[in-house]
Image (cartoon, rainbow, N blue to C red):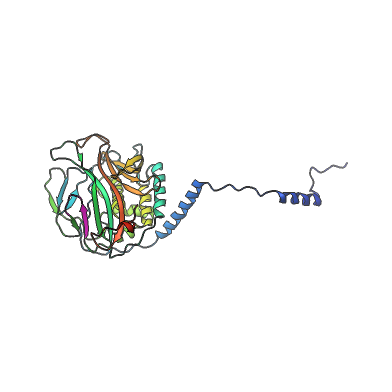
Amino acid sequence: MTTSPRGRSPHPSEESERLDLAALLPPPSVPDLDPHRGLLLKEALLREAAASEASRARPARAPRPPRWRLARVLGPALACTVAVGGVVVVNLPDSAGPGAGTARGGAPAGPAAHGTPEAARLLDRIALAAAEQKQPAVRADQFVYVESRVAYAAQSAGGGPASMAPAHRRQVWLSSDGSRPGLLREEGRPDSVLGGDAPVQHLDGPGATPRPGTLSDGRPSVGDPTHAYVASLPTDPDTLLALIREETGGGQDPDQRAFDAIGGLLAETWAPPEVGAALYRAAARIPGVTVVDGARDAAGREGVAVARTAHGRQTQWVFDRVTYAFLGERTVLTEAGDAGPAGTVVGTSAVLARAAVDRAGEVPGAGEGPGRR
């Protein structure tokens, strides 16, 4: 008995006809790359480039003449300040407060802990924008000029709620390599030369007897930076954060110390784009970092903030919602106390301009277009 096969190969003429017909059909459509996916791919490329850059060796620190560290006096340290020669030293509490060293939800933050996923995503976008900034090179013999508006609350020695003074103009000129004295100029106060040997008094706590001391050992650091030092910082976020922790170590809240140190570098230095991006990505690795949807800087500009809460107050970095440019800082009480109710703003700033100038006291002309971030 003969059986028929279950299938057969097409006749050569049929196969040829099928191929001819297929050739007349339009090619299959290829879906466009999703815009979000494109951003992720672009960010991954920048990360890979930053990782290769991080392998470079950091230059050794060279001793330099001692200079005053520019003290950024924030409102939270209200009562423990003594001014000598135009410099104010602030005694910060070491005891851990709410939000100190913990991630969202109150869980203890281990070495591998990070900020919230929302904060990590926002800081990644901010880092990507920072990496794309165009910035002129700053020569070793120049000064970095930063202009801002600031306002900080003050509390009387007798206690009572803190009162916020009106925002005023602040200008600072810092020697790029730290070899020449800088200058601090604030409305309503005499100019302060930055880089002398004036004595500094420290207070160990309210009511303590002031003791003499110095602010710097003569070498640049995260807490006492020059532009040359900032430009030499590693661009790998993990390496950078480890360095910041090492140089701000001590006390019971290293996470907040690291967050404050990064905030200081953002506010009154002019980090190169790749270093600025690394600072933001390092901040994303600090436990307890969150997002505040609406915040205003000292100039009244509204934006989105990256924040961290510790010791009954929240430090906020305010960014433009569209460009992700750094606008300024704000400090808000999160607990009611002698200084005022929760929600009281006790410190605010707004960065208005950054530029490289040839001498201390020189203000960039309107046509020079000072850099902003």
> How many numbered marks, from 0 up?
0
Q: Residue 341 appears at what percent x and percent y?
A: 24, 34
Tell me if residue 188 is in the magenta stretch.
yes
Identify the residue at the far left of this view: 209
Q: Residue 41 appears at what percent x and percent y?
A: 49, 51
Q: Residue at horizontal 24%, vertical 45%?
A: 167
Quarter of the picture containing the N terminus is top right
Q: Nearer the viewer, residue 100 or 188?
A: 188
Tell me if residue 167 is in the magenta stretch.
no
Q: Nearer the viewer, residue 278 or 354?
A: 354
Q: Is residue 232 in view from this perspective?
A: no
Q: Note whether 163 is above or below 188 in the view shown.
A: above
**Image quadrant of residue 172?**
bottom left
Q: Which residues are magenta?
A: 182-190
User: Is residue 32 rendered to the left or right of residue 319?
Assistant: right
**Image quadrant of residue 371?**
bottom left
Q: Residue 22 appears at what percent x and percent y?
A: 72, 49
Q: Is residue 332 in view from this perspective?
A: yes
